[in-house]
Amino acid sequence: MLSKKTKYGLKALTFIARSTDENPVQVSAIAKSEQIPQKFLESILLTLKKSGILGSKKGKHGGYYLRVSPEEILMTEVMRVLEGPIAMVSCVSLNFYEKCDDCADEHACSVNKLMIQVRDSTLNVFRNTTLADLSGQN
Amino acid sequence: MLSKKTKYGLKALTFIARSTDENPVQVSAIAKSEQIPQKFLESILLTLKKSGILGSKKGKHGGYYLRVSPEEILMTEVMRVLEGPIAMVSCVSLNFYEKCDDCADEHACSVNKLMIQVRDSTLNVFRNTTLADLSGQN
DNA sequence: TGTAATTCCTATTAAATCGATAGGATTAAT
DNA sequence: ATTAATCCTATCGATTTAATAGGAATTACA
């Protein structure tokens, strides 16, 4: 299941992408509009900032903004930052690979084979979807 | 992430599908071969039995067996029994649908749109994979 | 220069879930 | 009867998740 962190993060990014204002978007505005607990949202946007997807301005009239245009923000990147590995088992993860301890030979493992297919089909979606698609700018 | 329950369950089903023995397959044999805690595996196989995928025979020389041939056992069914919903959010689940409380209009929700695509691409894999594929009988 | 408004940071908590274990009841073969 | 297997219920510890709390740092602007 998708974590609320990811769900809130995606909604927030969509909100920011849709904003036409000159000024950066404030956490309070997003929280109110999207019904997200503000303090929780703060920490999520901070994560997105540290990963380089968002930029921020502190102090009065501060807030968050996209560092690049929505068309350039791929779901692969967003999902990895918010949700972690895209693969359902780490032994088929491209970016977070780890060997299974209970599995001698990966290539002989039936779960491995299945999960590679799931990973690839999911990746195919995320690689072909940008924030612009989410925010309806295409 | 895939739960260990599902991972163990898939491995166990594969093991049973590969068994050429006349007699049903015993939990102890699977546990030993696949390095799965036996008591945990017991409860997993029981779940698979209650769902109708496995049959069982009690008492001495008892064990578990497939109720239909591997080619007829779809991953959609197995995954739903072991892991639950295939969708990442319940508002796009076909078999476990639930409305989001924080979301007024589903069709206007950017997360919803994205997760429908992920669901469909994952379903496409599970609908086209049977236990026979996992156990290498094709 | 002071005050208000905002992001930034750390710690804590409550609840839920997961993985595993324990102990025994029930059933069937020999 | 005895043995060996599934079946059933309950519990436990660890981890993760979602959220809250409190305040430090920074900036705009009067």
Image (cartoon, coloured by chain):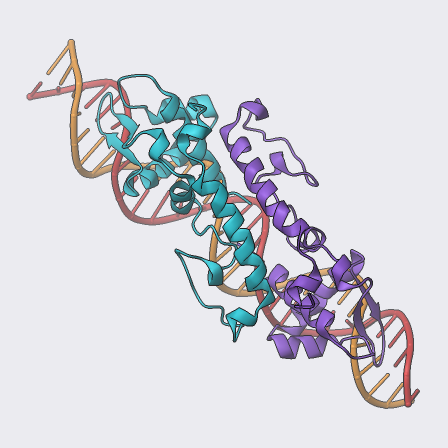
Chain colours: A cyan, B purple, C red, D orange
Residue B26: where, in percent of width, then height?
75, 76
* Vertical comparison of B79 with B97: above or below: below
Location of the N terminus of chain A by quadrant is: top right
Q: Which residue is drawn at the image coordinates 36% and 30% (left, top)?
A: A70
Q: In which quarter of the image is residue B92?
A: top right
Looking at the image, how many numbered discs can be counted on the residues?
0
Q: In which quarter of the image is residue B105?
A: top right
Q: Which residue is drawn at the image coordinates 64% and 67% (left, top)?
A: B11
Residue B120: where, in percent of width, then height?
60, 41
Horizontally, residue B128 falls left or right of residue C30, namely left
Q: Which residue is drawn at the image coordinates 61% and 72% (left, top)?
A: B36
Residue B79: where, in percent of width, then height?
66, 53
Location of the C terminus of chain A by quadrant is: top left
Horizontally, residue B54 falls left or right of residue D22, namely right
**Nearer-the-camera pick, B85 or A28:** B85
Q: Looking at this view, name the residue that lies furthest to the front.
A: B138
Q: Which residue is drawn at the image coordinates 54% and 28% (left, top)?
A: B102
* Vertical comparison of B54 with B80: above or below: below
Q: In which quarter of the image is residue A60?
A: top left
* Vertical comparison of B106 with B25: above or below: above
Horizontally, residue B101 falls left or right of residue B73, namely left
Horizontally, residue A15 falls left or right of residue B85, namely left
Residue B77: where, in percent of width, then height?
72, 52
